[in-house]
Amino acid sequence: MASSIVLFGPPGAGKGTQAGNIVNLTGKPQISTGDMLRAALTAGTSLGMEAKVYMDAGQLVPDDVIIGLIKERLTQQDAVDGVLFDGFPRTIPQAEALSEIAELSIVIAIEVPDNRIVERICGRYTCGGCDAVFHDTFNPTATEGVCDLCGSTQMKRRADDNEATVLTRLAAYHAQTAPLADWYRQRDLFISVNGDQDIEKVGAEISAVL
Ligand code: AP5
Ligand code: MG
Ligand code: ZN
């Protein structure tokens, strides 16, 4: 498999928001473990039911579940030229497992201070038709309730996008995921971009890196 890219950062950093641009630039498909888990839940699979308990609590889903999901996803034909991982890996064991199954070219970290995260997460909504990400204040749809990209009026909010759960997700990020930054720095794969600026400016920094 050709080399893949990792989008790294705390909850609400803008990983999902920036992924579309990177997919357009590189042609690599986005693999978001969060989106896959939510799709499994919507489909009512046992995996989805198991994951829901952790997601609703703001905790990480166990590594073996996530690694199994990724291994299966990487067998699909569209992954042969490398992929864009969004929200994976999130623990050292996940990064170790990934190093055995895929080659990475770069880990792009979107840096956003903790005090910006709650307002980002609590104002987020997504399009049920195409999964585009919006925000009540920072990135609203041009016409209220209508997706700019696909015209759907099925806007959704995530069950885990409330202040209490966000704080738990942020704590899980600092305890379990942030240590990966040094792990990847030691491997010369880590690049930071400033995520605390307009969506377009973050996108321009990422494009420059790529
Ligand atoms: P996941 O779905 O990955 O959630 P997350 O990591 O918490 O990240 P988010 O999707 O909340 O944020 P984002 O960075 O994508 O931000 P977005 O672009 O939407 O994971 C959910 C759960 O699944 C986890 O808690 C865990 O339980 C489980 N899970 C998933 N992967 C796992 C793994 N590998 N291992 C174990 N468990 C796993 O932007 C947020 C908002 O901000 C939007 O409204 C957007 O419009 C706005 N915004 C974006 N950029 C800007 C900007 N520059 N300025 C202003 N507003 C902005
Ligand atoms: Mg996301
Ligand atoms: Zn849409």
Image (cartoon, grey):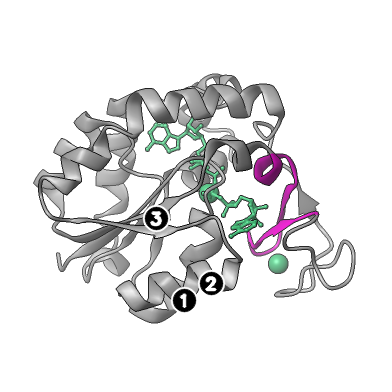
Per the image, label 3 sits on a secondary structure element best described as strand
Q: Label 3 crowding class (10 Å Cα cut-off): few <14, some 14-19, many 20+?
A: many
Q: Residue at x 13, y 58 (%)?
A: 103
- Against 48, residue 72 (above or below) is below
Tag 1 residue? 204
Horizontally, residue 175 falls left or right of residue 127, namely left
CB of mark 2 near ligand 1 (< 8 Å)? yes
Q: Disc 2 designates what residue?
A: 201
**Residue 116 sits in quarter:** top right
Left or right, 201 with reference to 80: right
> What residue range appears in magenta?
119-136
Residue 120, how many percent across, how many down? 66, 46
* Horizontal arrangement in the rendering, residue 187 relative to residue 135 (left or right): left
The reply to whether residue 3 is in sight is: yes
Whether the residues at callouts 1 and 2 have beta carbons within 8 Å, the answer is yes
Q: Earlier along the polypeptide chain: callout 3 or callout 2?
A: 3
